[in-house]
Amino acid sequence: MDFPKEIFISGTDTDIGKTVISSMLVAGLNAGYWKPVQAGRDPITDREFVQNVTGLPDNHFYKESYDLAEPMSPHAAAEIDGVQIRLDAFTIPKYSQQNLVIEGAGGLIVPLNDREYVIDLMAQLNTPTLLVAKSGLGTLNHTLLSLEALRNREIEVLGVVMVGDEHSSNFEAIQHYGNISRLIHVPVLNELNKKNLINQFKKTFSQ
């Protein structure tokens, strides 16, 4: 798989596996990592998690544009912190690596403020997107709606990454109804470390 210089990792929901897939790409590509909006720091931020499991040095990791304390939707967490998220505050950092992995917050239609959503940020950054989805029951509606929303914003979709046990029926349905040629399965990794992430990256993306 040929990766663009900048890759946005989004998901069909929260806790869907975006950070693990981001870690896999960061480790496999020796890439930089940037999370524009972090909501919640307990026990650690996603940037700290990715750095811990990839073992890469500080110069691979770029500061969040908004680092919010509460693990909530960005608009609500920002209100508690007394700040307002503005799209004009986001600029892709100048990175020294060949690739930059950008991880979104929650799903696509998650509010950033009283007018704009994560998908509006994605459209502004104009980076190709990998959509992360669960492989099991309930994934068809969430994944097909997400693909429709991305295409309505004319955001390039590199493919869909399905995380969990293999479900051939769901796989085939998303491929057909979602009109997706690149559909990727990633099992749940029992142990997250640089070696396992790179091995899974090679199995998944180097074919």
Image (cartoon, grey):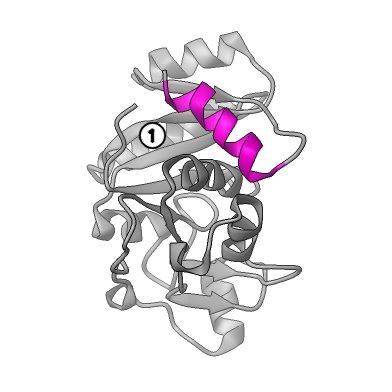
Q: Amino acid at mark 1?
A: Leu
- Quarter of the C terminus within the rendering: top left
Q: Main secondary structure of the magenta part?
A: helix
Residue drawn at 42 percent across, 42 percent down:
29
Residue drawn at 44 percent across, 83 percent down:
84
Report the span colored magenta. Answer: 192-206
Residue 83 point in image, percent of width and height: 49, 87
Q: Is 165 rendered above or below residue 100?
A: above
Which residue is under mark 1?
147
**109 drawn magenta:** no
Tell me the quarter of the picture where residue 131 sits: top left
- As drawn, the residue found furthest toward the bottom would be 82
Residue 15 point in image, percent of width and height: 65, 48
Q: Is 44 rendered above or below residue 20?
A: below
Residue drawn at 59 percent across, 9 percent down:
168
Residue 118 point in image, percent of width and height: 41, 58
**203 drawn magenta:** yes
| Element at label 1 | helix
Q: Is residue 20 visible?
A: yes
Q: Is residue 16 visible?
A: no
Label 1 Cα crowd, 10 Å radius (few <14 / some 14-19 / many 20+): many
- Quarter of the N terminus within the rendering: top left
Residue 136 point in image, percent of width and height: 66, 24
Taking depth in this image into account, of 51 and 115 the one nearest to the observer is 51
Residue drawn at 37 percent across, 65 percent down:
116
